Amino acid sequence: MTDSPVRPPTAPPLVELRGIVKVFPGVRANDGVDHTNAAGEVHGRLGENGAGKTTLVSILYGLEQPDEGTIAVNGTAVRIESPRQALSRGIAIVQQHFALVPTLTVAENVLLGQEGRPVFSAARVEAAVGALAETYGLALDPSALVGELSIGQRQRVEILKCLYREPQVVVFDEPTTVLIPEEIERLFETVRTLASEGRAVVLITHTLDELMAVTDRISVLRAGRSVGTFATAEVDPPGLARLMVGREVKLRSAVVARAEDVQLEEHAEHEVGDVVLDLAGVTVLDGSTVRLDRIELTVRAGEVVGLAGVEGNGQRELVQLMCGTRRPTSGTVRVGGVDLSAAGPLRWQAAGVRVVTEDRHATGLVLDMSVGENLVTDRIHHRPFSRRGLLSFGQLLQHGRRLMREFRVKAPSPATPARSLSGGNQQRVVLARELSADVRVLVAAQPTRGLDVGAIEEVTERVVAARDAGAAVLLISSDLAEILALSDRVAVIHRGRLLAVLAQREATLERLGPLLAGHVDVAEVAS
Amino acid sequence: MMVGISITAGAASDLFASAARLATPIGFVALGETFGEAAGIINIGLEGVMLASALAGAWAAASSGSVLTGFAVAMLTGMALLGVMALLCIGLRANQIVVGLGMNLVALGATTLVFKSVRTVALAPGLDPLQLGFLADIPFLGPAFFRQRLTFFVLLLLTAAAAFVLRRTAWGLRLRAVGETPAAADAAGVRVDAVRVQAMLVCGALAGLGGAALSIGELRGFTENMVAGKGFIALAAVIFGRWKPWAVLAACGVFGLADALQGQLPAWDINFPPSVLRMLPYLIALVALAVQRGRARPPAALSIPYERRR
């Protein structure tokens, strides 16, 4: 990379969007949005889920065409009709949902679309990609298959793909939702490096502290409209949060340093009953890979046990176990004393185990079905929804309307396809279905991932309410603040093993931090 | 039923020779389908494409007297038919299975109709087996593999070329990306639909060559429904060979061997119900696919038309 001089933020904008309007059926996703980005400037865009951030990015990257408005790059008005055109104009994007081919190597993914010559040598490409990764401190093996990488590593591949094209403008769309704190810090270093090289960086997020940490300017979007643009040095987080949601919210920082305050604030006294969920020596093997290793864990009625851990350390397998879609290789799982180790999904549900899965798109909802249908997928065979094998649409609609009201699902009607809802509303649908059944055990996996502040607050309240109603709650999350705020006990999982189960007062950041990274001894010494 | 016999080296050599000969037309088609499936297009209509190009090739060879013309016309026929399928499957995002089924039904009807009115296609010039110098005299291997027709050697070359193209060229990389995660390829600036159309045209060219390898190369003429399931066997070979050119070719060899046994067993005085023997290649295909399940993973976007989200 060349050491281009840093231009002051007063330089003419490298990219400029004016009066962007984009209308989707029933919603003005962007309603007269402006965006300017000078070279060397990090411009943050803040907004709730569904505020129109992703639509704006899609327009800049040619995935969507604006209904009104203009785009200028380097002072020249342009039309961007496809990602190809965006790339040829020096605009690259690190997408929220990774656009990677799992069956290709890191180097092949980087090369894809910009091969240059018709025949390539794998060795040479891997060397070039490896060198680039090193320049930006992105630790990666260029010959590894992308399908075998962790989420954080995949994001680094995405960043490499962008950098390989020498872009002038780099857009990060919600880059931190899948990262652990150290990875976030590393990502921000990369962002700062990019800006110092004279590139324009757009950072899309709904996490305030991240914007405060890394941006030069911040623009707030609300319901498709620009609410204002500010120099980062001149604004405070509570003020921005108010602008973002248009109402007061209890500010819940994702920055771990503040988690302890939250913990004290939200923990009220409550009754804890008998053991309901009991895992004894549970081991799950995938071929010869150990996914879960002799897990011993109990959850009592009226208790929240938080399972902390970096994603991909066995949490998914644990959730599959509780859904009845995977059986332990050895060990037993009991619910209320009944052994469910060999039970299928129906028996798990009948035992009152309700699961909010981590991926609402893949396992939580059937996106092409309506909200009303999604609200009964687990009980569609039963009265009153089904009589002698025939569905009762009246019951379905009535049930849908009732739950939508109760759980504040914002959708035109129960007949609306689940796909067209925002992330927060989709999660409300999942919660409504799971919590409207008899809940003895609630397993909530990453329940607030990707949600905006208001929705997080609401989901958290629902989980607490389930606990207060006597459910045994297993909260699986990679967000330590969330774990600390809600849990009576905290278990830490690493490489399929429970490294510790700590009482609330013992679960301090000093103890949890090393455990998350798998350092048992260090943790014990520290305590 | 079975009698104890000792199969001589000569008999085994004959068996492999006819296996290689019978596998050749299937090999071309399977190789073509490997490209198509790598790009995410499944072509159930291979049987029909093969049949139509077998007829077109035989007709062109018979009326021009030139084998080369026959092969060229068969290849163009395959490409034209795949072009039509591309128009439907990619241009109009029609269901690939339905289009493929339609292709088979139309091709069977149309070729039968043409065949009944143009009887001359029953006889066409053909290819004679080559004698590749000293190679042909190697014991066992010589008679089995080095006295084959030109088509066999062309197939080997094309397989090598296919393996290279898929692994080592920019186009091959794009092809694999488009078949696995078209959205990712799109975001990387690859024209998904264009790459898929190109893959289909390559598939058509190779399927056309396969048809001609059968009608001109081997049987010197066209007969009604002469493909008789070979197009479907080619589809099975692609799965059996896990979408890798050399492995796909080997799978075709296995099916060729099963086919060859049919002809050879009676010659060795082994009595086996001929109806069971005729089932053998298809039976092997079924068993192969059943065993294969779970181990091989097809391209993730196979048969799914690509549309940009929202």
Image (tube, helix red, strand yellow):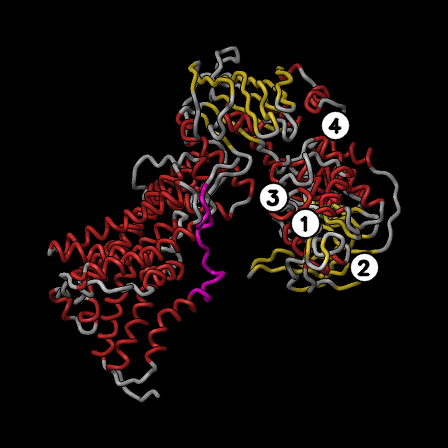
Q: Residue A251 carries which label?
A: 4
Identify the residue position indicated by label 3 in the image.
Answer: A367
Q: Name the N-terminal-most of marks 3 and 1.
A: 3
Stretch in magenta: B289-306
Mark 1 in CB contact with mark 2 (< 8 angstroms): no
Identify the residue position indicated by label 1 in the image.
Answer: A493
In front: mark 4 or mark 1? Answer: 4
Q: Name the N-terminal-most of marks 4 and 1.
A: 4
Q: Where is residue B159 in the image (x, y as percent from the top left)?
A: 28, 55
Q: Name the N-terminal-most of marks 3 and 4.
A: 4
Amino acid at pointer 4: Leu
**Along the line of sight, the residue nearer the viewer: A474 or A522:** A474
Chain assignment, label 4 = A
State which quarter of the image contains the N terminus of chain A: top left
Q: Residue at x 21, y 70 (%)?
A: B144
Chain assignment, label 3 = A
CA distance separating discs 2 and 3: 33 Å
Amino acid at pointer 2: Gly
State which quarter of the image contains the C terminus of chain A: top right
Secondary structure of residue under mark 4: loop
